[in-house]
């Protein structure tokens, strides 16, 4: 996995899985390994990683072996993809980074409750996968039904 980003997420969390669905959708070059916490030995990936902390928020290990957490991990992953790179620029605007951190903290603290609304908030990519829609057929796709 060296030379790649490793995104560690809670595989039991609907919000986490839907967010990772977006990462996989955006990752056309395959540079991010999305790894559920349940399937990896954290100590082998990086000595700073603990299961308790990883269950609280997204953790990303960069190719330089830096660990990004929470909102910083979101911004770090957003900077990898051309479609979301502007997030890193907007994050530098005074006050935006703190606002992003607070919003992330709220979502992380309430993710299981918010997971009930996953289909409305974040679920489109996951549902497209189940209906067989691909990137090449975006122009003709119909919105999935619940």
Image (tube, rainbow, N blue to C red):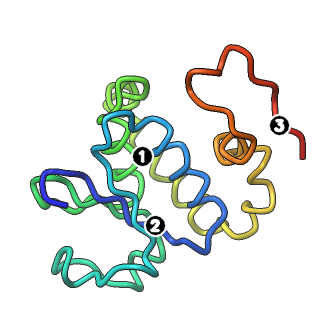
Instruction: Give the residue at mark 2.
Output: 9
**Is residue 99 in view from this perspective?**
no
Instruction: Give the residue at mark 1.
Output: 98
| Image: 44 above or below 74 | below
Could you tell me how far apart the alpha carbons at marks 1 and 2 are, in whole angstroms? 22 Å
In the rendered structure, which disc, 1 or 2, sits on the residue that comes first in sequence? 2
Which residue is rendered at x = 75% and y = 23% of the image? 141
Name the one closer to the observer, 132 or 126. Answer: 132
Could you tell me how far apart the alpha carbons at marks 3 and 1 are, in whole angstroms? 35 Å
| Image: 16 above or below 90 | below
Q: Position of residue 49 (x, y in %)?
A: 26, 78
Instruction: Give the residue at mark 3.
Output: 144
**Is residue 109 in view from this perspective?**
yes
Could you tell me how far apart the alpha carbons at marks 2 and 3 are, in whole angstroms? 25 Å
Which residue is rendered at x = 27% and y = 44% of the image? 31
The answer to whether marks 1 and 2 mark residues whose Cβ atoms lie closer than 8 Å is no
Q: Is residue 80 left or right of residue 14?
A: left
- Secondary structure of the residue carrying tag 3 is loop
Q: Position of residue 51 (x, y in %)?
A: 38, 84
Q: Position of residue 134 (x, y in %)?
A: 60, 31
Residue 60: image tag: none
* Quadrant assignment for the N terminus: bottom left
Q: Position of residue 109 (x, y in %)?
A: 60, 69
Q: Assess disc 2: are there few (<14), some (14-19) or many (≥20) residues with their C-alpha within 10 Å of its C-alpha.
A: many
Q: Assess disc 1: are there few (<14), some (14-19) or many (≥20) residues with their C-alpha within 10 Å of its C-alpha.
A: few
- Secondary structure of the residue carrying tag 2 is strand
- Please identify, in this view, whether the residue under mark 1 or under mark 2 is nearer the observer: 2
Q: Quadrant of residue 12?
A: bottom right
| Image: 84 above or below 97 | above
Which residue is rendered at x = 81% and y = 25% of the image? 142
Q: Residue furthest front?
A: 132
């Amino acid at each position: 996995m060296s030379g790649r980003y490793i995104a560690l997420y809670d595989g039991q969390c609907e919000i986490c899985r839907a967010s990772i669905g977006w990462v996989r959708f955006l990752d056309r070059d395959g540079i991010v390994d999305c790894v559920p916490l349940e399937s990896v030995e954290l100590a082998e990936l990086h000595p700073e990683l603990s299961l308790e902390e990883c269950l609280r928020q997204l953790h990303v290990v960069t190719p330089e072996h830096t660990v990004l957490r929470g909102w910083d991990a979101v911004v770090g992953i957003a900077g990898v993809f051309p479609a979301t790179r502007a997030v890193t620029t907007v994050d530098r605007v005074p006050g935006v980074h703190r606002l992003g951190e607070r919003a992330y903290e709220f979502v992380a603290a309430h993710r299981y409750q918010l997971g009930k609304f996953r289909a409305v908030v974040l679920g489109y990519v996951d549902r497209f996968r189940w209906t067989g829609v691909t990137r090449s057929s975006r122009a003709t796709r119909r919105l999935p039904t619940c």
